[in-house]
Amino acid sequence: MTDPVTDPTTATAAGERGLFDLTGHVALVTGGNSGIGLGMARGLARCGADVAVWGTNAERNEQAAEELAGYGTRVRAFGCDVGDEQAVGDAFAATLEHFGRVDSCFANAGRSGTGTPFVGTSLADFRAVTRVNLDGAFLTLRAAAGHMVERGGGGVLVGTSSVSTVHGAPRGQAYAASKAGLTAMIKACAVELARYRIHAHSIIAGWTETPMASPALHSEGFERNVMKRMPHRRWGEPDDFARLAVYLAAGIGGFHTGDEIVVDGGYSIF
């Protein structure tokens, strides 16, 4: 039988989930209709969590909800532009109306930069990136934290950051700045909200196969120059984030908070 401690996301029945049984847990994943967010949502649903998915693409929302519902938990997808304060408020209210609570919130929705040289980047282009990656994470995490504080009982806040905060990302200043800001914001949340038994972490994601990143990953020059710096000799996959999402949501590491958890196949240390 599968060992749920070493491989929790392969469990299919509550009796097999052990420490990672998330039955009755409600997780919110923004950008959960594809890429890293969908990988997280899959892991959470496989371990019994009810999952709310937020996304702006209606077709992908529907496809993700249909797939996740196949794991036998409650799933609902909501359309939401996380950079819009009113939209976040409405989506969070709708999520609570449907599920009754939110126990963990994964602020994963994001967008890439324009690839414009720094000196040619307009303020509008810079803010278009930070609007989603930083403002959107702030609005989402603020809504979730407010609910968790009011409800009591603790909770988990997670933000998807990037290795762009670790190494220089040419033509990616807006993206790197937004992700560095998110990481710093998460640390502040970890300290301020600890008294409410709310844990907060950022995930430092490496090069991962997603609709947003894959075209660049498979361009000849990029793959030739970067793959040789990947100790695992492959790009990340969305499901590489499934087990981590389950671990964080389950609250197994009760004294573990404020961490920057790197998931990059060893890229940043090689």
Image (cartoon, helix red, strand yellow):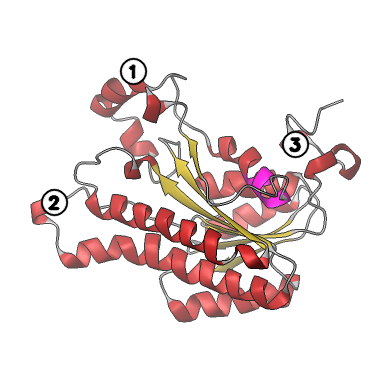
Q: Which residue is mark 3?
A: 8
Q: Which three-letter amino acid code belongs to the residue tagged 3?
A: Pro
Q: Is residue 235 left or right of residue 103?
A: left
Label number found at residue 228: 1
How far across and how far down the image is residue 106, in percent?
57, 56
Picture coordinates of residue 257, whole percent (x, y): 59, 51
Q: Kindly state the secondary structure of the residue where label 1 is placed.
A: helix
Q: Find the distance from the CA under tag 1 to the CA under tag 3.
A: 31 Å
Q: Nearer the viewer, residue 245 or 81?
A: 245
> Is residue 18 toward the left or the right of residue 40 in the image?
right
- Position of residue 114 measured from the top left corner of the image (x, y, whole percent): 23, 52
Residue at position x 61%, y 53% from top?
63
Looking at the image, tell me whether mark 2 or mark 3 is earlier in sequence order.
3
Q: Secondary structure at mark 3?
A: helix
Which mark, by number, is residue 118? 2
Q: Residue at x 37, y 40 (%)?
A: 163
State left or right for residue 174 relative to residue 27. Answer: left
As measured in the structure, the alpha-carbon distance from the residue carrying label 2 to the one carrying label 3 is 43 Å
Q: Evaluate if marks 2 and 3 touch, with contact meaning CB atoms under 8 Å apart.
A: no
Image quarter hosting the N terminus:
top right
Quadrant position of residue 253: top right
| Along the viewing direction, whichever of 89 and 5 lies nearer the viewer | 5
Q: Residues within 10 Å of mark 2 (few under 14, many from 20)?
A: few
Number of numbered markers: 3
* Residue 185, percent from left and from top: 43, 61
What's the magenta bit mostly, secondary-structure-wise? helix
Question: In percent of the image, x 75 and y 67: which residue is there?
Answer: 153
Name the amino acid, label 1.
Lys
> Which residue range is magenta in the image?
245-250
Q: CA distance from mark 1 to mark 2?
A: 27 Å
31 to the left or right of 2: left
